[in-house]
Image (tube, grey):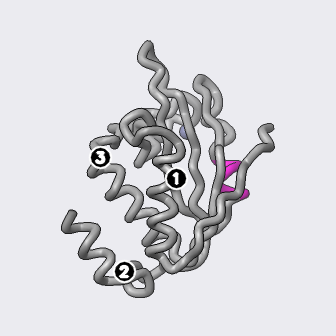
Amino acid sequence: MPQIKALLELGPASAYQNDGPGFLYYPIRVAPGYQAAVEIKAGHTNDFRRRQHQYKKCKKGQDLWFVAYCETPYRMFAERLIHLRLRALGAHVDSYPCPGCGKEHREFFLLDIIGGFPEFEDVVCWAVTQAGGAYIRQNFLVES
Ligand SMILES: [Zn+2]
């Protein structure tokens, strides 16, 4: 995968100008429609609570919840690696308007094609390690 190789060669400290410490978070949603596909996203943010709040209105008209998050020293670098790996699996979902907020959330992936949450997390762990971090999952249990 040439894009992954190129990114790894650049390294986490020089790949993205505004990169730095932050969080990777993983919302799961069940896509509307008869297929009811389970989709997962790895997004990055430097303010997890704010991002969590932004997704609150997305729960209208669909099931959407956060399962976990982790910290990483280079959140953009790690997120990009994850997206490239999951795209290479053919798991990428074309974006569509969110039934809750109307926005087309990007970079959701089909969990079935990835294998399941453990396989998804293996990719996250690999990416965080490449970004110079140590993967520690923060389970996200509170829903309101
Ligand atoms: Zn939304």
Quadrant containing the C terminus in the rendered view: top right
130 w.r.t. 84: above or below? below
- Mark 1 Cα-neighbour bin, 10 Å: few <14, some 14–19, many ≥20: some
Specify the quadrant of the image occupied by residue 65: top right
Amino acid identity at mark 3: Leu
Q: Quick one: SS at disc 1? A: helix
**Magenta stretch, main secondary structure class:** helix
Q: CA distance from mark 2 to mark 1?
A: 23 Å
Q: Name the disc covering residue 121, or none.
A: 1
Q: Amino acid at mark 2?
A: Ala
Q: Which residue is mark 3?
A: 89
Relative to the observer, which residue lies in front, 40 or 125?
125
Q: Residue at x 42, y 33 (%)?
A: 112
Crowdedness of circle 3 by 10 Å Cα count: few (<14), some, many (20+)?
few
State how many labels appear.
Answer: 3
Q: Which residue is mark 2?
A: 15
Residue 95: which quarter of the image?
Answer: top left
Q: Position of residue 78 (x, y in %)?
A: 46, 68
In this view, which residue lies farthest toward the left? Answer: 2
Magenta range is 49-54
Ligand 1 placement by image quarter: top right
Residue at x 45% of width, y 26% of height: 37
